[in-house]
Amino acid sequence: MMETKLTKEYARQKDAERNLLAFRKEFHYPVYKSYMDTHTLGLMPVSAQKGIEQALQEWQKYASNSWTQLQDPWLAMAENVGAKMSELMGAHPKEVVATGTLSSNLISMLTTFYKPIDNRCKILTIDQISVSHIYTIHSYLQLQGLDPFENLVVINTQNEFISEKEIISQISDEVILLILPSASKINGQLFNLSYLSNQAHDKQIIIGFDFSDTAGAIPHTISESDIDFGFWTASKYLYGGPGASAFLYINKNHFGRLPGITGWFGNQKPGKHPHPTY
């Protein structure tokens, strides 16, 4: 097998074959030209300023009527943007919504899907998931009166590749929820979502993924993989910028499940804010 030499000429050849150079003009580049840090913050799209200016003009001209009277009304923006995102993620349009932040969406998923049953109360993950998720899960378990060091099990991979079979082998009878990254930001490993989902469901375990390091970078078919939920930020390969809205995916099989914390999306239309009946 001939070894590929990773040279600048080879990189330029592959760029030419993929015909992606045309997209370069769609982004602003920093003063130092070469940019390899998209895994933390994507470059600013040229169209971003125009989009922000349009939103400001709508606010200025139409004020509260912008919620319902525009051609693209603000009230439907979260669902409409989610439907567009679903095409990129290989999901059904109603399964994806633009909302919240990465951490707040994880909390929302924990309140909805983490339902301990007797001694089945542990959450399993790997050390290659974002450290902020470890903090979030720890704090949530503490709020539930549970010891996070007992009820969050983190597989130590030492940042090396880990097989999906090895992850599944770490599931004990006490695990009820599995949360994983779709890929390792450390070594680039992509995980087989369908295999992990099938194995988890065979063990009656809910499984969710953070897609922050793959959304916008590779094709997805998350509905086909039959995972239960997913969440991701738009600030990386989706070029949403700092503070950009995040996204939630919920498998349509769970549409009848009551959310753990209700709010703006906690009830069905029409009538966004009906008063609860006591």
Image (cartoon, helix red, strand yellow):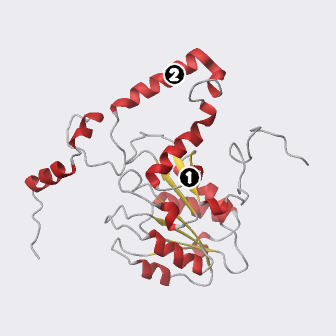
**Front in this rendered view, residue 57 or 119:** 57
Residue ranking furthest to the right: 278
Q: Is residue 111 above or below residue 60?
A: below
**Front in this rendered view, residue 158 or 92:** 92
Residue that label 2 marks: 56
Circle 2 SS class: helix
Residue occupying the point 58% across, 65% down:
228
**Which of the 4 image quarters holds residue 72?**
top right
Q: Is residue 180 above or below residue 18?
A: below
Give the x, y percent position of residue 152. Answer: 57, 72
Circle 1 SS class: strand
Number of residue marks = 2
Residue ranking furthest to the top: 61
Amino acid carrying mark 1 in the image: Leu
Left or right for 242, reference 4:
right
> Which callout, 1 or 2, points at the residue further toward the start of the chain?
2
**Which of the 4 image quarters holds residue 260?**
bottom right
Residue occupying the point 46% across, 27% down:
52
Amino acid carrying mark 2 in the image: Leu
Left or right for 28, reference 57:
left
Residue that label 1 marks: 248
Which quarter shows the N terminus? bottom left
Few, some or many residues within 10 Å of mark 2 (<14, 14–19, 20+): few
Left or right for 73, reference 14:
right
Q: CA distance from mark 1 to mark 2?
A: 26 Å
**Which of the 4 image quarters holds residue 2?**
bottom left
Residue occupying the point 72% across, 76% down:
117
Give the x, y percent position of residue 130. Answer: 45, 60
Q: Is residue 278 above or below residue 175?
A: above
Give the x, y percent position of residue 125. Answer: 50, 71
